[in-house]
Amino acid sequence: MINWDMIECLLKQSRPNHTGPFRVAIYSRMPYDDGQEATAEIHIKFMKLVLERDSLFRIEGVYSEFGVPFTDFSAMQEYQLIVEKCKAGKIDLVMIHDLSRLSKDCLHLMKNTEPLAQCQPEIGILSFRDQLLVMASDAAGWAEKMASGVYSACRLPYFVGFTPLPPDHCEI
């Protein structure tokens, strides 16, 4: 079970005056054209079911694409639509089934999250299966910060599964 209180707390840190539900885009990318529609549909249905149970979140859109490699950002047309909506301030959180929907390696994860990292306020990326919340600005700079040895400037992903957070505690 995902710790929604922790997610709310982290998102509110970059949106102190936020009111109402957080706006969520669901993103599904499958690397092959054929035979993955059913799998993507199951992932999307499950993520929708989880989000619709909590009034803290409102689904702004579902974006999916097939046969698109994570190594070619220009081919990720649906993801680019999400980026544009994030830049316009219409999305607060991008929910994916797992991090492999954005990339299977750190280099491309950085490249593919860089456009989201430019958004203000910060955009959260929730990896449902991995139960991780990543702030886009952190994901975009991980390898660079780690390569330079500046670990203290690099927030790691927040594990948001099975971690109770006291209601009055928002220090992460």
Image (cartoon, grey):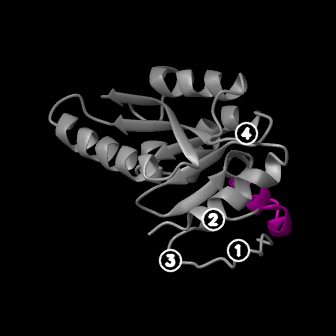
The mark nearer the N terminus, 2 or 4, is 2
Which mark, by number, is residue 89? Answer: none
Q: What element does badge 2 sit on?
A: helix
Pick the front one: 91 or 130: 91
> Quadrant where the C terminus lies?
bottom right
Residue 104 seen in the figure: no
Left/right placement of residue 96 relative to residue 40 reads right
Residue where numbered disc 4 is placed? 117
Which mark, by number, is residue 162? Answer: 3
Residue 136 seen in the figure: yes
> Quadrant where the N terminus lies?
bottom left
Residue where numbered disc 1 is placed? 167
Q: Nearer the viewer, mark 4 or mark 1?
A: 1
Residue where numbered disc 2 is placed? 5
Instruction: State yes or no: residue 146 in magenta.
Output: yes
Pick the front one: 127 or 13: 13
Contact between marks 3 and 2 (CB within 8 A): the answer is: no
Residue 3 spot, x, y in % from top left: 55, 68
Q: Amino acid at mark 2?
A: Asp
Examine the image and state in which quarter residue 29 appears.
top left
The mark nearer the N terminus, 1 or 2, is 2
Q: Amino acid at mark 4?
A: Ala
The mark nearer the N terminus, 3 or 2, is 2
Q: What element does badge 3 sit on?
A: loop
Residue 77 spot, x, y in % from top left: 47, 20
Residue 155 spot, x, y in % from top left: 75, 63
Left/right placement of residue 105 relative to residue 14 reads left
Examine the image and state in which quarter residue 57 appears.
top right
The mark nearer the N terminus, 4 or 3, is 4
Q: Amino acid at mark 1?
A: Pro
